[in-house]
Image (cartoon, grey):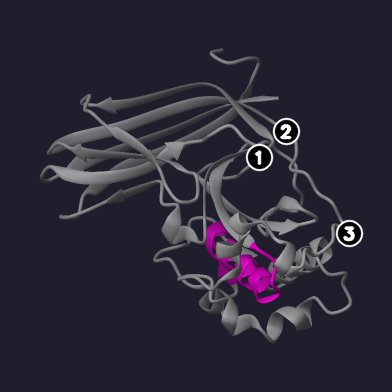
Amino acid sequence: MWLHCTCDLSFQIPVDTPFTLMLRPRSGHQQWVGREQYVFNPNIQAVEYTDPFGNLCQRLVAPAGPFSINTSVDVQAADAADSEPGAPFVEVQQLPDATLPFLLPSRYCESDRFAQMAPEITAGFAAGYDQCQAIVHYIRQNIQYAPGTGGDIISASEVNQQSHAVCRDMAHLGIACCRALSIPARFVVGYLETLTPMDMHAWFEAYVGGRWYTFDPTQNNLDGGRVAIAYGRDAADVAIYTQFGSPVTLNNMQVNVHRTDAPGY
């Protein structure tokens, strides 16, 4: 199916302010970018680069005053993310080099603190995909998904002490538990067609059975088209915008995703 995804951001900028952005999805597994548009108002020059995780990033200096960013993209996506119960654990010595950074503790995913809990909640499950599913089940059973309640970003160990959390925080907990079992896990930010209320969404992927698979503690299943925008070790790596210097005011952020017949329609 084709998805039409838009993200509109409007700011009030006090002084000329440097930004980095991550708002361009790239074609890859289960998604193909057919058409995209990226508009700044006022129109300014931006420079694009690729970060260490392969994300398409933009650098710019926003001028003082009102400033807006409007993106739209048509992406051919799967109706549901792939699943593979029983997909086996991959021994660390057999992992591709690119997956190794996703085994280590990171700022918001302190996997070293879950060395005891992760084996306990996955006891009796086959090593690999089934362990990841057990982790997702544990999160769903113990933490209520509460969109709109997230303030400051908190770490996985802090999330594990709460009764409710946003998608970002629940993904952090899933990642930390997977890494504690020597399963590479990475944070994903992007669009989800079936998300309610609509916003940017976060989930995680784990490397089992020789490839990455999607896991989402906030959803009861993997139905609905997904468009990944950026990947990282945790939320610190994948902010859709980062500004430097004097604080700016985000006046409005609006995200929309709907099915469409073909690119441009």
Tell whether position 172 is magenta. Answer: yes
Judge depth for marks 1 and 2 and give the one in front: 2
Q: Are marks 2 and 3 in contact (CB under 8 Å)?
A: no
Image position of 211 (left or right of 184): right
The secondary structure type at the circle numbered 2 is loop
Three-letter amino acid code at the position of disc 3: Gly
Marking on residue 86 = 3
Percent of width and height locating residue 15: 10, 45
Percent of width and height locating residue 255: 47, 37
Q: Which residues are magenta?
A: 164-184
Three-letter amino acid code at the position of disc 1: Thr
Provide the residue designation for mark 2.
78
Provide the residue designation for mark 1.
194
Asked if residue 33 shows in the view, the reply is yes
> Who's the residue at 69% across and 35% down the image?
30
The secondary structure type at the circle numbered 1 is loop
> Who's the residue at 44% across and 56% down the image?
237
Q: Tell me the quarter of the image containing the C terminus.
A: top right
Main secondary structure type of the part rendered in magenta: helix
C-alpha span from label 3 to label 1: 26 Å
C-alpha span from label 1 to label 2: 13 Å
**1 or 2: tag closer to the N-terminus:** 2
The secondary structure type at the circle numbered 3 is loop
Q: Are marks 3 and 1 in contact (CB under 8 Å)?
A: no
Towards the viewer: 149 or 115 = 115
State how many labels appear.
3
Three-letter amino acid code at the position of disc 2: Ala
Tell whether position 211 is magenta. Answer: no
**2 or 3: tag closer to the N-terminus:** 2
